[in-house]
Image: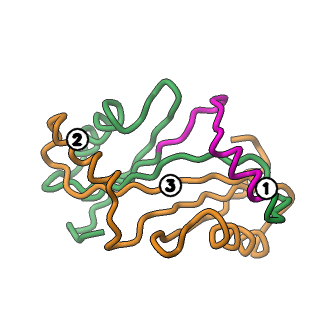
Chain colours: A orange, B green
């Protein structure tokens, strides 16, 4: 099973990396670019886990390690891909 | 319009950050964790752009700045969210 986890800066939290990328895109001529926010995309392969229990474990991983909930939000989805390697 | 861009390390490219996170998850007792891959999730707001043309521009942004295509893959989707702030 594969967990796809998205960690994003909370609304209102300053995102200097996003600001830098927005400026770089403007400098490259992409004038239509407005706000840019940069987060993390994490794929975690889970061996032998499935269903509700696996989702609970992934939530726990996010809360304990993957997201800093003071400044970041997270969401995730779990995909049963038959254990193939990503 | 909002572009959601996912930049991931190419298959076969070493991902030391992912390895470190996998080890940290093991240390926290998540023994079911296998491979971990860490990429970027980027939201770019586009003012006044839409449809095929906007998608082409986003592809160009990825190729020129957001992804290093030697070691990274990218994919994206565009969402018409009525211009509301994310």
Identify the residue shown where x is 25% and y is 43%: B52
Residue A40, numbered label:
3
Residue A20 on image: x %, y % = 28, 47
Left or right: B10 as drawn, with respect to A22? right
Identify the residue shown where x is 20% and y is 66%: B83
The quadrant of the picture occupied by the C terminus of chain B is bottom left
Left or right: B46 as drawn, with respect to B29? left
Q: State the separation of the CA atoms marked 3 and 1.
A: 18 Å
The residue at which mark 1 appears reads as: B33
The residue at which mark 2 appears reads as: A25
Left or right: A49 as drawn, with respect to A37? right
| Camera-side residue of A49 and A38 | A38
Residue A8 on image: x %, y % = 45, 63
Local SS, label 2:
helix
Residue A59 figure quarter: bottom right
Residue A57, numbered label:
none
At label 1, counting other C-alpha atoms closer than 10 Å, the crowd grade (few under 14, some 14-19, many 20 or more) is: many
Marks 3 and 1 belong to one chain:
no
Seen in the picture, residue A39 relative to B40 is either above or below; the reply is below
Left or right: B52 as drawn, with respect to B28? left
The quadrant of the picture occupied by the N terminus of chain B is bottom left
Q: Which residues are magenta?
A: B7-26
At label 3, counting other C-alpha atoms closer than 10 Å, the crowd grade (few under 14, some 14-19, many 20 or more) is: many
Residue B69 on image: x %, y % = 45, 28
Local SS, label 1:
strand
Local SS, label 3:
strand
């Amino acid at each position: 099973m594969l967990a796809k986890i998205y960690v994003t800066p909370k609304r209102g939290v300053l995102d200097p990396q996003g600001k830098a990328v927005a400026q770089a895109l403007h400098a490259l001529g992409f004038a239509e670019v407005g706000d840019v926010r940069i987060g993390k995309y994490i794929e975690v392969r889970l061996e032998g886990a499935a269903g509700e229990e696996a989702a609970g474990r992934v939530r726990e991983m996010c809360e304990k390690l993957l997201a800093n909930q003071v400044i970041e939000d997270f969401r995730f989805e779990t995909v049963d891909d038959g254990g193939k390697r990503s």
